[in-house]
Image (cartoon, helix red, strand yellow):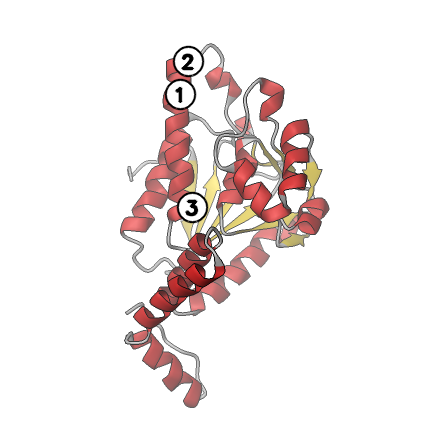
Amino acid sequence: MKETLDTIAIEAVDEHRLVVRLSRPASANALNTAMGLELRDLFTGLYVEPGEVRCVVLTGAGEKAFCAGGDLKERNGMTDAAWQRQHAIFEQMTLAVVECPIPIIAAVNGAAYGGGTELALACDFIYAARRARFALTEVTLGIMPGALGPQNLARAAGVRRAKEAVLTGLPFGAEEALAWGVANRVCENDALLDEALATAARIASNAPLATRRAKRTMSIGSDLDLRSAFALDLEAYNRLVPTDDRQEGVRAFNEKRPARFRGR
């Protein structure tokens, strides 16, 4: 990860929580090549070396937009080869978010269109401001969503809802996102980040090895039959039994005090 970031801002709330802001407010935080690279490198880095980070909140700078999707000004006049090269970076970015072992909460503070909705869906779950709007508009541009949006939306909202959203390109609001299972919570606009950070604090207070393994088994297990998913759960469970954190959790319960988990 380079030292100077041009398109995202990273704030350490404390030793265990990070706020990552998509930070191109003049362009509605649209995804350009530089942002794709910076997000890819950030989440790849957290995969390789999470350090003390236990939860990430991903949001947008400003009040109007989470992310407007791919930057069409940058894409205007791109050759096919340049477009596909850029999209390969976005593919890597998406997989880096999905595969990051650290829990990631999307705090959608405004419009999330195209790749913005896809980026939010790639996170573990979504808190949406009341003013948030979602849309997968790619078919109106002659393409289709290409960053796991159709698959993640279908898994969250069901295939029929996903088909309607993708094939029409029409936007839907925060309350619809909540009703469809796309968002976990609708927050008042000014309370969004505080609520996301409160949940991040709760996650960060739990045993990090346990939360990371639980995230992984749920992410992979959703594509498996029940018995295979159960076997995956049990393998992860048994790897946690000999950890110091498991022993600390039991001690803390019996001593009636908060557990001090250290990730080992």
Res. 196 visible in picture: yes
Cα–Cα gap, marks 2 and 1? 6 Å
In terms of depth relative to the viewer, which is nearer, 107 or 147? 147
Assess disc 1: are there few (<14), some (14-19) or many (≥20) residues with their C-alpha within 10 Å of its C-alpha. few
Tell me the element at label 2.
Answer: helix
Q: Is residue 30 above or below residue 191?
A: above
Q: Is residue 187 above or below residue 233?
A: above
Q: Quadrant of residue 168?
A: top right
Disc 1 residue type? Gln
Other-residue count near label 3 (Cα within 10 Å), few / some / many at <14 / 14–19 / ≥20 = many
Q: Is residue 47 left or right of residue 129?
A: left
- Kindly check if marks 2 and 1 are in contact, taking CB atoms under 8 A apart as contact: yes
- Quadrant of the rendering where the N terminus is positioned: top left
Q: Residue at x 33, y 75 (%)?
A: 245
Q: Residues within 10 Å of mark 2 (few under 14, many from 20)?
A: few
Q: How far from the left and from the top, in percent, is residue 198?
A: 54, 62
User: Dot 3: what SS?
Assistant: helix
Residue occupying the point 39% across, 83% down: 250
User: Which residue is disc 3 drawn over?
Assistant: 98
Residue positioned 62% across, 50% down in the render: 183
Work out whether residue 209 or residue 7 is closer to the camera in this orientation and state it. 209
Residue type, mark 2 in image: Asp
**Of the residues shown, which amino acid type is indicated by label 3?**
Val
Tell me the residue that label 2 is attached to: 80
Q: Position of residue 234 (x, y in %)?
A: 38, 68
Element assignment for label 1: helix
| CA gap, disc 1 and disc 3 | 21 Å
Name the residue carrying label 1: 84
